[in-house]
Structure formats: structure tokens, C-alpha cells
Amino acid sequence: MSASAPVIEVLVVEDGDEYITNLSTFVAGGIHYTQAKSGGAACELARRMGPDVVYLDMRFDRTPFEELLGDIVSLTARFNGDVARARAFLQDNQGLFILRALRDAGYRGPVILSYDFGGEERRFRALSAKDPALSYCPDYADARAIRAAIVGAAQQGR
């Protein structure tokens, strides 16, 4: 990025502090990060700040259960009454529930899911067919790959 390029505003949505710490430390320079730790907070911040990119974790196992988005009753029915499986599904796929909430709240910009869809290419194709502004960056990606994903998403969103 050149010195005259605008700063890229990224909303980082995660239930811990790993991404915000690593991104701020290793993927800095021309990128400003704001953090939300739940789907509700992400929707509010997206409305207020209008980020260029949302960097979204997939798994939310540290978020208090009452702050998770999704319908536990219908998920429990889907899993034949198994509340534990429904809860695990909600935590493991919370990023997709947050993505839906962001879209429902009016955010149309690019979203990068921090998740490795390498073994689930068909699943990602189905998701991105419904949401062309969606991309992913594997959890294990290095700083260069993450920067490229963020800059590329921001450029496509402009």
C-alpha cells in the first residue's frame, strides 16, 4: 500500500483476542482494526462504522450461550432433541449466523471468514453462490496471505 492510500477499516469479529492481537501486530500499516466479540455487537458496529471489510471467526465457543445468534429450539429439533449437539453446532458455525445477521442488518461489504474450507470446497461454493462478497482465509494463513485477503476484499468492495 502506498502512503497516500486510504486506511482500510476492518471489523474483526471473534470471541477471544487472538485475531485482533495478531492482525494489529503482524498485519498493520494502512489497516485499522475494531473488534466485536459477539454477533449483536458486530451488527451494531457495522451499522455505526460501515467497515470496508469484516474479518469473521467461524467458531465461538467462548461467547456466553445467551449471546449466540441462532434458534436453539429449531436446531435441537434438527438434531432429534439433542441439546448438546445443537449447542455445539451453534458454537461451531456461529460465524455463519453472524454473517446472516450482518446481511439482515444491511451490511453489504466484503466478509472474510477465518476458516479453512480446503476440505469443504463444495460447502464454500454453496455459501459464496448465495453471498458473492464472501471469501475465506484459513486460520493458519501467514501475515502476507491475510494482508492480501484484506486488501483484495477492500478493493472489490469499493
Image (cartoon, rainbow, N blue to C red):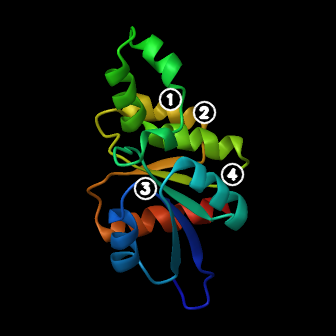
Q: Estimate the x, y position of residue 12 in percent, counting from the top left.
A: 49, 62
Q: Nearer the viewer, mark 4 or mark 3?
A: 3
Q: Position of residue 103 (x, y in %)?
A: 66, 43
Say few, some or many: other residues with alpha carbon within 10 Å of mark 2 (under 14 / 14 to 19 / 20 or more): few
- Residue placed under numbered mark 3 in the picture: 14
The image's mark for residue 107 is 4
- 90 up-or-down from 35: above or below: above
Percent position (x, y) of residue 56?
47, 53
**Amino acid type of the residue tagged 1 in the rendering:** Ala
Label 2, label 1: how many angstroms apart (C-alpha)?
7 Å
Q: Disc 4 to disc 3, how far (Cα)?
A: 17 Å
In front: label 2 or label 3:
3
Circle 4 packing at 10 Å, graded few (<14), some (14-19), many (20+), is some
The percent position of residue 20, horizontal first and vertical second, equals 40, 68
Contact between marks 2 and 3 (CB within 8 A): the answer is no
Indicate the secondary structure of the residue bearing disc 4. loop
Mark 2 vs mark 4, foreground winner is: 4
Image point 32% across, 44% down: which residue?
A: 116
Spatial CA span between label 3 and label 1: 23 Å
Tell me: 104 left or right of 63. Answer: right
Instruction: Specify the amino acid type for callout 2.
Output: Lys
Residue tagged 1: 126
Mark 2: which secondary structure? Answer: helix
Lateral position of residue 156 relative to residue 29, left or right: right
Sequence-first tag of 3 and 1? 3
Question: Within the image, what quadrant is residue 143 found in?
Answer: bottom left
Sequence-wise, which precedes: disc 1 or disc 4? 4
